[in-house]
Image (spheres, rainbow, N blue to C red):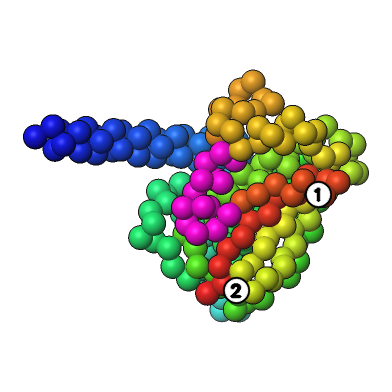
Amino acid sequence: MVSRRKSEEGLGMKSEQDALKEAMIKMSKLALLGDMAPGIAHEVNNPIAVIIGRAEILLSQIQEGPVDPAMLTKSISKINEMAQRVSKIIEAMRKVSKAAKQSEITNQSLKIIFEEVLSLCTEKMRKSLLQLEIQDIPEDLNVVANYSTVSFTLMSLIFNCLEELTKLPEDQRNVWINFDFVDDHVLIKVRDSGRGLNPEVQKNLFSPFNSTRPDAAGLSLYLAKGLMEEMGGSLVFDSSSPQTTFILKLTRA
């Protein structure tokens, strides 16, 4: 009886811990998206403005008389292109904010993950004058991963770079993303042009509630590391690099 009670208490504690962890992950994801929100809004508003403008022109021309078929086709194609762009941004937001369930670890296109994550970060990077150089990703490069986990980790690293590089002169804000292949793994190296991190900061880098920003919870790197490991991958800091460098390890599909 005592053993059963202890077992039930253990399950209850585990359930509470899981619920707390899930809440922390959700809070951190929403905080990241919140920080990117002005840029995301800009990325959505631009194509919407094009859609509205094209639609108004078409309505005006229809009222005036017959519409040139070539012009009609061109306008509809542009409207469709812009609508698809908005749809992709919204879908990327939905995927990033989604809970990272282990049952959803499947073959994922690394190129698509990067394209969708960068669609959420582009405007923020532009306003921060950050220059991103990313190695070409083969169309057929797939990894065994959870989309939500990888996208959240990448966004966390990019935002971390943004925060650090704003301290540098405008023409020195660079981020490089490169790939190495070791056995059946893909190593994604995210390196920025900052001056690196001192040993004390490195020691607490993946600790919870560790942040140099007073308005930040300091959870994203801690959670990203844990989620990557749960997924069978890893997230480490490369202390041998003179510049701030993170390495994500994923299994090739």
Contact between labelled residues 1 and 2, with CB atoms less than 8 Å apart: no
Q: Residue at x 68, y 71 (%)?
A: 182
Q: What secondary structure is the magenta-colored segment mainly?
A: helix
Q: Is residue 157 visible?
A: yes
Look at 53% across and 52% down and name the residue there: 228
Magenta span of residues: 221-234
The residue type indicated by label 1 comes to Ser
Residue 251, position in %: x, y?
Answer: 56, 68
At 39% from the left and 57% from the top, the residue drawn is 102
Which residue matches tag 1? 240
Q: According to the image, label 2 marks what residue?
A: 184
Q: Earlier in the sequence, mark 2 or mark 1?
A: 2
Pointer 2: residues within 10 angstroms few (<14), some, or many (20+)?
few
Does residue 226 lie above or below 16 as drawn? below
Q: Position of residue 8 (x, y in %)?
A: 18, 36
- Report helix, strand or loop for mark 1: loop
Q: Is residue 165 left or right of residue 140?
A: right
Q: Nearer the viewer, residue 137 or 243?
A: 243
